[in-house]
Image (spheres, rainbow, N blue to C red):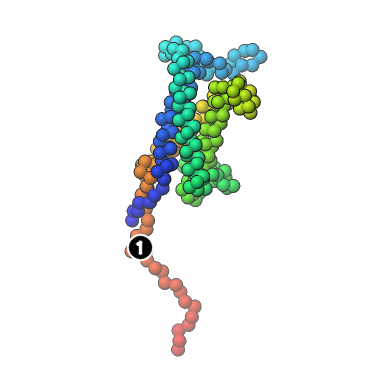
Amino acid sequence: MKEIKEKHPLAMRWTHWINFPILTIMIWSGTLIYWANDVYTITLFGHKFFGFFPEGFYTAFHIQKRLAEGMAFHFLFMWAFALNGLVYVLYTMISGEWRELVPQKKSFKEAWLVLLHDLHIRKMAPPQKKYNAAQRIAYTAIIVMGFGSLITGLAIYKPVQFYYLAWLCGGYHFARILHFALTIGYVFFFLIHIIQVILAGWNNFRSVISGFEVVNKPDPKSIVETPVPSDEKPVQ
């Protein structure tokens, strides 16, 4: 017997779907900024061992220096990214949804079991409520990453006015490295998240859109009661 069950509140669904295109634009515009000033390399003793985008990449794809365009989009959508994240965090705190999202002491151990189950190495998945242990860790980490991107971004954007943020990030140059590393983290999160959504199936994806999921419940009519044996002797 199938039953429709509420899973995701409207506020969480809205902030989720609004954040997806905003973060995509932030990554795209950040890439334009990086391409206009390709400074991140792996260098040791003055010798450049690795560059994220070699010169042949720019030549093959005819990539132009679009620094002004990238900065305009990046700084505009930065405020939308921050506002949407603030609404999400405030809602989870006020509504109590944070209890379902914040990792517990056993979450890190269970996350490993979830991974083994997803890789079809372990048959049984660990018990879960609304989110499993791996999801708790991932969704909490993405909030921390968003806060880190905002802090490092402001430190890069206005290093003089927000000098205390630049100091907190270890200086202007280290703030740029952290900001770039967080962007790479978002890309990996996107890829893993999309793969997980595909593996979870249509019912899970539908719940993020509609807020409801279809669950299978046993039919009460099909449940046969087993008589409980009695130790009492029959009365003579």
Q: Position of residue 143 (x, y in %)?
A: 52, 36
Q: Crowdedness of circle 1 by 10 Å Cα count: few (<14), some, many (20+)?
A: few
In front here: 16 or 227?
Answer: 16
211 shown above or below 231: above
Q: Position of residue 122 (x, y in %)?
A: 50, 45
Image quadrant occupied by the C terminus: bottom left
Determine the residue located farthest toward the front in the rendered image: 161
Residue located 34% across and 53% down the image: 2
Q: Position of residue 180 (x, y in %)?
A: 54, 24
Residue located 43% across and 26% down the image: 25
Residue located 37% across and 41% down the image: 209
Q: Position of residue 145 (x, y in %)?
A: 54, 33
Q: Amino acid at mark 1?
A: Pro
Task: Identify the image quadrant of residue 66.
Answer: top left
> Can residue 56 be seen here?
yes
14 shown above or below 32: below
Tally of numbered tags? 1
Task: Identify the image quadrant of residue 109.
Answer: top right
Image quadrant occupied by the N terminus: bottom left
> Can residue 119 be seen here?
no
184 relative position to 205: left or right: right
Question: Circle 1 sits in a helix, a strand or a loop, which is it?
Answer: helix
In front here: 189 or 89?
Answer: 89
Residue located 39% across and 49% down the image: 6
The residue labelled by disc 1 is: 220
Determine the residue located farthest toward the right in the rendered image: 45
